[in-house]
Image (cartoon, grey):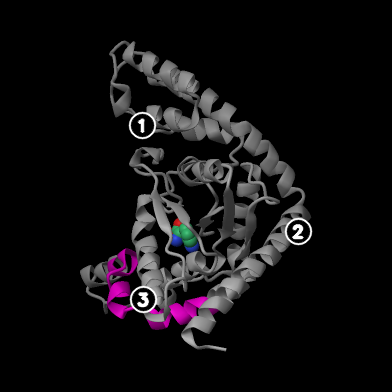
Amino acid sequence: MKTLLTAVKPTGELHLGNYAGAIRPALEALGAPGVRGVVFVADAHALNSVSDPARLVRHGVEVATGYLACGLDSERALFFRQSDVPEIFELAAILACVCPKGLVNRGHAYKAAVGANQAAGRDPDAGINMGLFGYPILMAADILCFDADVVPIGADQRQHVEIARVLARRLNQTYGEGTAVIPDLQVQAESAEVPGTDDRKMSKSRGNHIPLAASREELRARIFSFVTDGRRPGEPADPEAVPLFALAKALGTADEARAVAAALREGAGYAAVKEQVFESVDRAVSPIRRRYAELRDAPDVIDQALAAGAERARDLASGVLARIKKAVGLS
Ligand code: TRP
């Protein structure tokens, strides 16, 4: 049995980029035989940037609803909210004592925040809380607390999992082999990245995203707002240079993507291409949209799934934590 672990930070509504880049590949990997899935809503991770409790709760529910709507089997995988598993936070306190501060000083997110402060002539640590600084330690605790073997991630999370590996190795070197399981990272190909309406990587902070649960009308409007160049109908286009094609490839079937490529090469106008891409994306997301709406009307179903998942997750995490506490000499 291999334990595969993945989590999403609930900082905004889920979008097609989360789906194609993270959720769908994770669900595929979780469906493989011999895999135990650990999937959670990383609400405590969001606490370093979300100070409105109602928003934190709402985004957490959105993420949970999204996973279930996309087909996560919460009976098979351990599916829960991070903050329902206090063992993680206890482990984070232990890992903080194993973690060299210099390692965290080099964290991308922290360095970017310091860089932005310096560029603006502010104190380097202005507005930076310890949650942001220590983010990699909490994330290492997420991973090590479940003896995760594999962590599938986007390239932006690579450094975090590398730090988790360093901390696992240090535990084993200091306290004996077998104290922690060293997780493998599985970095998703760059090509799994979905462009947003402005052709930059789709992200909620850029506002260029298409919500996973968008209505058919909203989906059409968002796809029609995609940037295009000044090419005139009749002029052939190279599909690889057209962001709409990347969207079609990420969400449509192979046949649908081929049809979009052919239309572009034949010089179809962008309005026609957008219509074609819209229909194929709509076909892909309409079952998700339907289940999302059903679940939204049944919040008890989601609560119960998360509560049952938390209980099973604590079962696993408390065993791992007890092993590590014993190894380091804590009661
Ligand atoms: N840091 C990840 C993100 O920002 C979310 C996350 C939290 C995570 N804990 C994790 C991902 C553990 C993988 C494993 O998206």
In the figure, residue 99 lies in which quadrant?
Answer: bottom left
Of the numbered discs 1 and 2, the one sitting upstream in the chain is 1
Nearer the camera: disc 1 or disc 3: 3
Q: Which amino acid, by three-letter code, is at mark 1?
A: Pro
Q: Position of residue 113 (x, y in %)?
A: 31, 68
Say which mark, if any, is on residue 163: none
Please give the residue where the numbered disc 2 appears in the rendered image.
Answer: 304
Determine the residue positioned at 64% across, 64% down.
313
In the figure, residue 129 lies in which quadrant?
Answer: bottom left
Looking at the picture, tell me which residue is in the foreground, 189 or 264: 189
Determine the residue positioned at 36% across, 37% down.
191
Q: CA distance from mark 2 to mark 3?
A: 41 Å
Say which mark, if any, is on residue 243: 1
Q: CA distance from mark 1 to mark 3?
A: 48 Å
| Left or right of residue 64, residue 3 in this image | left
As for residue 136 lying within the magenta part, the answer is no
Q: CA distance from mark 1 to mark 2?
A: 40 Å
Nearer the camera: disc 2 or disc 3: 3
Q: Which amino acid, by three-letter code, is at mark 3?
A: Gln
Looking at the picture, tell me which residue is in the foreground, 320 or 82: 320
Q: Which amino acid, by three-letter code, is at mark 2?
A: Gln
Of the numbered discs 2 and 3, the one sitting upstream in the chain is 3
Q: Tell me which segment is drawn in magenta.
A: 90-111
**Please, what secondary structure does the residue beneath circle 1 have?**
helix
Is disc 1 in contact with disc 3, using a CB cutoff of under 8 Å?
no
Q: Position of residue 211 (x, y in %)?
A: 54, 43
Please give the residue where the numbered disc 3 appears in the rendered image.
Answer: 173
Residue 127 appears in view: no
Q: How many marks?
A: 3
Nearer the camera: disc 1 or disc 2: 2
